[in-house]
Structures are given as structure tokens and as C-alpha cells.
Amino acid sequence: MAWYVNDAGDVVGMGDNAQGNAHPLLVATKGSAAFQVIDLGTLGGEEKAMDFTVIGMAINNQGLVVGHAHTAAGPLHAFAWTRDGGMVDLGTLEPGTSSAAMGVNDRGVIVGWAGASSFWGPDTVAVAWIPKGNGWELTKLADDLNTSAFAINNAGQIIGGYDMYNQPKGLRWEPLPDGKGWRMQTIETPAGFPFFYADASNEAGLGAGWVVPTDGSTFTKSIPAVWKPGDGPGSTGQVTVLATLANPAKGPNYADGMNDVGDIVGLSSDDSGTQQAVAWRIGAEGTVISLGLPGGEGLSVNNWGVVAGYGSATNGQIHAFIVRLRPECQGQLSNGKFQLTITGSAEAHYTIEACSDLRSPWLPIGDVTASDGTVTFTDPSPADVGARFYRAVSAGP
């Protein structure tokens, strides 16, 4: 299962090893070691096959991986992993025995939960691990039990939740001046949706998750939603419901991940009740895009539009996937001509467009097909055409 992808294309998640034990995993998708699986190891516990509590939950852009695994004594503990230092047990709050790391920012601040429960529940509290010296200092984010923090951006804004399994409320923490802690607020929900589960955030401070209607249970009638902060201190912001594949909505529908350029990913149930990995765009919340992965879920999306998640294979096994929402483009000069290399989906068709200043209309200058997923296009225009901007627009599969 692929749980998170950073901007370098590094993916973390979990999978079973040859002995049938679940381990946190890291996979780079670029460079000479692309798609070679790195087993991050464990904290000494005996891990069972497909144990989703043993996982790499997030990786920042410096390569710091956080997640959770069982200790030799049995309880679940949060961990941090680096290539140089390996896996470090982040500990828990006394007298509790368990903890989990859910998110990390590029400053190395880690968020999650800690407490006495074996997983997030009535005896856990939202926490942060703050870098200090060669390690981290553990601090509580809330006095209320049954809370957890899920994601933190580079400004220190944290998204999380309260009472996931019964009456979930979205929570947000705003950093106080001079690094003196955080101020917690409850995210207000729209009329008819009393409960909101907040799961992801971005650098603009937006949050993504799902709301639950008055007549629905926490998961079976969930509706994907995005929360946008309001203007000024004390504002509760606004929750906007996202479109679903079925209308009216059926089954579970979640928004699980978001990036800084307006992409949101998750899952939605279609008219038959089958869940599919899907995507949305900020500003076009009424449109849902199927990623063509029945039984799947998009869990994370980076700023290049690379989605990480999982899907069901034909044999019923769960497999990790990455998929691009748009092609990756790289340019270079060759013999006085500009060449554009496009990496996307195999057999995808693209129209190459150009403009002079980003204010003028985009004009088509050619069409290409990426037979094996990659294709190179040479601008046929004269060398003295002047400054140009280029983009590749999908013209269909």
C-alpha cells in the first residue's frame, strides 16, 4: 500500500515481506534506484501479514520518514527513519504505552497521537514531536482525549480530529507567536452535516476530509469535503462538499490527500457501490475525476500531480500504485531548437501549446503520442521566435 508521496517522488507505505510480515516500506520513483523497495525494518515487534497499523505514514522533502510499528514489548510506537540513522522509536506519553506518527513537515516537526489505547481512541491525545538537538521533544497538543493530529504544513498549521468512530469533529491548530505552542479550534460544518473528519492539509492551510449527514453513520454515508480558512482571527472558515461519482452519493466517499496547486485525491463510490480512486480540483469542486482504479483509493498527491494509493488486483490482493494527474515536462535546447520531453501515461495523446508571456492565448503547435509513456517533441518554430512558454495538454487516452 502506497500511503504518501513527497515532491521528490519518494513513496512510503507498507507491504508484506517474504516471510509474510508487514513492514514499513520506502520506494523512490526517480533516479538510478527507482522502484527498488527499501524495507525500513521494525521496532522489534512481531508483525502480522497486512497489518495496516505497521506503516510509513509520511515522508518530507528531506527524506525523513515517520510512521508506526510494534515494539518488542507489544505496543504500537511512533517512529522516525532516515537513511543515515535508520529507525528511531519516538516513545509515548507516560503513563501511556502507545503512540503513532501521522505527518511531518519539512522542518522535521512530527504530529500524531499518544496514550493508553492500542490505536487512536478514548484514551489517546493529539501530540507533536518537536526537533530538539539530535532527537525530538514530545508535547501534547490538546487536553481532550480521543484526539489526534494528522498533518502539519511548513507554517506549523496542524489538521486533526476528535472521536473518529462516533461523532468526528475536525480540529485545527494555529501556531502561537515565537513558537510557544498552538491554539486549537474546531472546524465548523455546513448545515445538514454535523460531523467532519479532517485528514489532510496543504501550505495554504486548507484541510481535506469528509462530512457525515445527520442520518448517516461515520463511514457508510460519508461525503468528501474541503475546508478553507476564513479571514481574520476567530473565523471558523468554510467547508465545501465535493462531488461524488454517484448522485445522490452512495457508500463511503473520502478526500484523503491534497497538494499546494489545487489537487485533491481520495475515493468515491459509483452507482454500483464500487469504490474508485478519484481526484478533484480546488475551484471545480462540483467535478469528480475517476482515476480508473476500481477498488482503489488515492491517499496522497504531490505538487507534480503524482498520486499514491492502493487498488485491488484481479486476484483480490491489494497493490500499491502511483498515477499522474498530468504529464511531467522537461525542456532543453538541441541544435538551436527547443525540445520538450513529456512523461505521462502509455499511449496518451497530448497537444503541445505555447504562448509568449502567460497572458496571451495558448496556441497549439503540435500533437504527440507517448507510446511507452515518454515522448520528445521539437518546436518547429524558427529559432528567433523569442521567449516562449510551453505546456502539454491531455488530448485523451
Image (tube, rainbow, N blue to C red):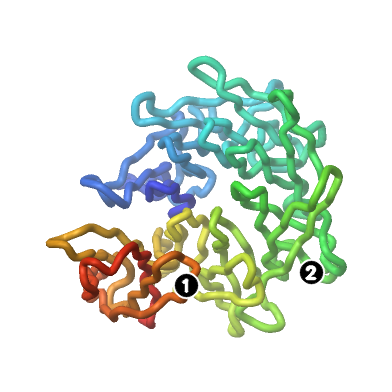
> Residue at (24%, 74%) from the top-left corner?
381
- In this rendering, the count of numbered labels is 2
Assess disc 2: are there few (<14), some (14-19) or many (≥20) residues with their C-alpha within 10 Å of its C-alpha.
few
For numbered disc 2, what is the local secondary structure?
A: loop
Who's the residue at 38% across and 37% down the image?
40
- Report x, y in % for residue 93: 67, 24
Q: What numbered label is drawn on residue 360?
A: 1
Badge 1, how many Cα within 10 Å: few under 14, some, many 20+? Answer: few
In this view, 275 is above or below 155? below
Compared across the picture, whether 36 is left or right of 116 comes to left
x and y percent of residue 235 in the render? 84, 49
Of the two numbered discs 2 and 1 on the same chain, state the one appearing first in sequence. Answer: 2
Q: Is residue 339 depicted above or below 74 in this figure?
A: below
Q: Is residue 105 above or below residue 3?
A: above
**Label 1 SS:** loop
Asked if residue 174 shows in the view, the reply is yes
**What residue lies at 19% left-to-right and 65% top-to-bottom?**
337
Task: Check disc 2 and report the residue beneath it.
Answer: 216
Q: Position of residue 159 (x, y in %)?
A: 68, 45
The one of 196 and 115 positioned closer to us in this rendering: 196
Residue 238 in which image quadrant: bottom right
